[in-house]
Image: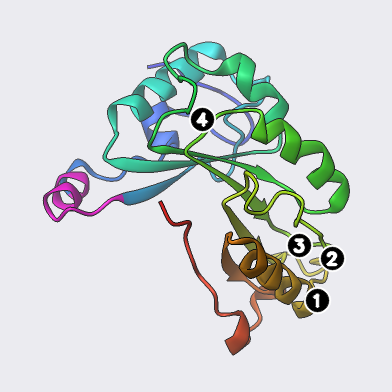
Amino acid sequence: MAVWSGAAHVGAPAKQLAVPPIAGIVEAAAAGERRRVFCMSLGDFWDNQVPDEWRTESLNTIRQCRNLDWLILTKRPQNILKMLPSDWGSQGWSHVWLGATVENMIEARRRIPALLRVPARVHWLSVAPLLEPLDLRPWLGRGIDWIVVGGETGAKDARHMEPNWARDLRDQCRDRGAALFLKQMWKRQAIPADLMVRDYPAL
């Protein structure tokens, strides 16, 4: 097994990719269910520091698990095209959703065009932590299918998220035909009833 000894992850790819137990995969397939796997929540699959051997082996694991939908998130979408496997195809693998983190408008303008240059079944954004009002209308429903929104948590000095910023994104998604999933509020405060939106893209 190839090992990436980076700061965030140490171990075999199958472990880092958080592949569900085989029994669970078989059970879901028998029930006709597709389950989603959020890949490497504490790392970046497309980081230049990730060894090519590790990424190749991990992509082989993903390639073989086609009854799961794999959600791969990055802050480096500009790297994806040069790191894709040769069989990615003109539409991407049908069971892989590619996402980019956009916490502010500077990163939205920089990362979204790079993400959309890569073919994928689903293009999505992680707007977490949401640090300022965002206008994502130029891309919602025009390549971006889904956004996940959340406030910063954990640290005592967690940066504030205004609920109205999330409401505005909710309305933008409704207007443009994109899906929104509100993950959490700032410092894990209670989610207001009108923001309890946890939708997935229609496939």
Can you tell which mark lies on residue 133? 2
Residue 125 — which label?
A: none
Indicate the position of residue 113 as horizontal and vertical percent values.
74, 35
Mark 4 element type? loop
State the quadrant of the N terminus: top left
Q: Tell me whether circle 3 and circle 2 mark residues in contact (CB < 8 Å).
A: no
N-terminal label among 1 and 4: 4
Comparing 33 with 10, the one in front is 33
Task: Identify the residue at horizontal 66%, vertical 68% (top origin).
Answer: 175
**Which span of residues is magenta-colored?**
24-34
**Marks 1 and 2 in Cβ contact (< 8 Å):** yes
| Residue contact between numbered discs 4 and 2, judged by CB atoms under 8 Å | no
What's under tag 3, amino acid-wise? Answer: Leu
Q: Earlier in the sequence, mark 4 or mark 2?
A: 4
- Establish if 77 lies above or below 185: above
Residue 135 belongs to the span the image colors magenta: no
Q: Where 185 falls versus 134 (above or below)?
A: below
- Residue at point 67%, 34% (across, down): 115
Which residue bears the numbered disc 1?
162
Q: CA distance from mark 4 to mark 2?
A: 36 Å
Dot 4 alpha-carbon crowd within 10 angstroms: few under 14, some 14 to 19, many 20 or more: few
Q: Earlier in the sequence, mark 4 or mark 3?
A: 4
Q: How many marks are shown on the rendered structure? A: 4
- The amino acid type, in three-letter code, at marker 2 is Pro
Give the residue number, with chain letter if any, for mark 3. Answer: 130
Q: Main secondary structure of the magenta part?
A: helix
Q: Which mark is residue 10?
A: 4
Camera-side residue of 43 and 10: 43
